[in-house]
């Protein structure tokens, strides 16, 4: 079915208004910042944006503006922004986890070495005590004499 020039102009106006809304971040519930949502918001058939259809140039303009915003770090779709934020947070948490695992491994090695050193020192103490107990060269000193200092009479 053919549309009149006035209808086409009206459709283009609605499409451009929908493009501006989507790029400002006014995404409808359940929608995205994409051609499907653009078509539904403008009340135009989605196929009119592809190939040699009448609004293909508006799809190209929408995608170009969307890419410029993304390259500038602006993400109009809050879900995409959330996904990007969560991916970055996930990467950071994975790095922290890897660092924590390295720290735990290092502390486990240190604990193992410390326990081995304590065991070796204990064995050395036991060995030295046995040597000291078996030696007969140790002489005991006589008990000290107690003298009573007399009183003068």
Image (cartoon, rainbow, N blue to C red):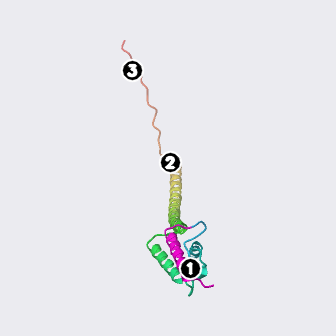
**Mark 2 vs 3, N-terminal side:** 2
Mark 3: which secondary structure? loop
**Residue position for label 3:** 149
Farthest top residue in view: 153
Against 15, residue 50 (above or below) is below
Quadrant of the image containing the C terminus: top left
Against 44, residue 99 (above or below) is above
Q: Residues within 10 Å of mark 2 (few under 14, many from 20)?
A: few
Horizontal and vertical percent for residue 75? Answer: 49, 70
Q: Residues within 10 Å of mark 3 (few under 14, many from 20)?
A: few
**Residue position for label 2:** 132
> Magenta stretch containing residue 24, yes or no?
yes
The main secondary structure of the magenta stretch is helix
- The stretch in magenta equals 1-27
**Residue position for label 1:** 7
Mark 2: which secondary structure? helix
Q: CA distance from mark 1 to mark 2?
A: 111 Å
């Amino acid at each position: 079915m053919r549309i009149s020039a006035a209808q086409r102009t009206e459709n283009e106006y609605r499409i451009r208004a929908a493009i501006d809304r989507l790029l400002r971040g006014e995404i409808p519930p359940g929608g995205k910042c994409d051609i499907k949502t653009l078509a539904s918001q403008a009340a135009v058939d989605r196929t009119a944006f592809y190939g040699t259809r009448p609004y293909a140039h508006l799809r190209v303009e929408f995608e170009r503006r969307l890419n410029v915003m993304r390259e500038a770090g602006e993400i109009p779709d809050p879900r995409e922004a959330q996904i990007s934020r969560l991916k970055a947070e996930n990467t950071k948490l994975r790095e922290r986890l890897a660092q924590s695992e390295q720290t735990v491994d290092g502390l486990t090695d240190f604990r193992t070495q410390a326990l081995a050193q304590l065991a070796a020192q204990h064995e050395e103490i036991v060995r030295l005590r046995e040597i000291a107990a078996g030696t007969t060269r140790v002489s005991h000193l006589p008990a000290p004499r107690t003298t009573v200092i007399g009183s003068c009479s």
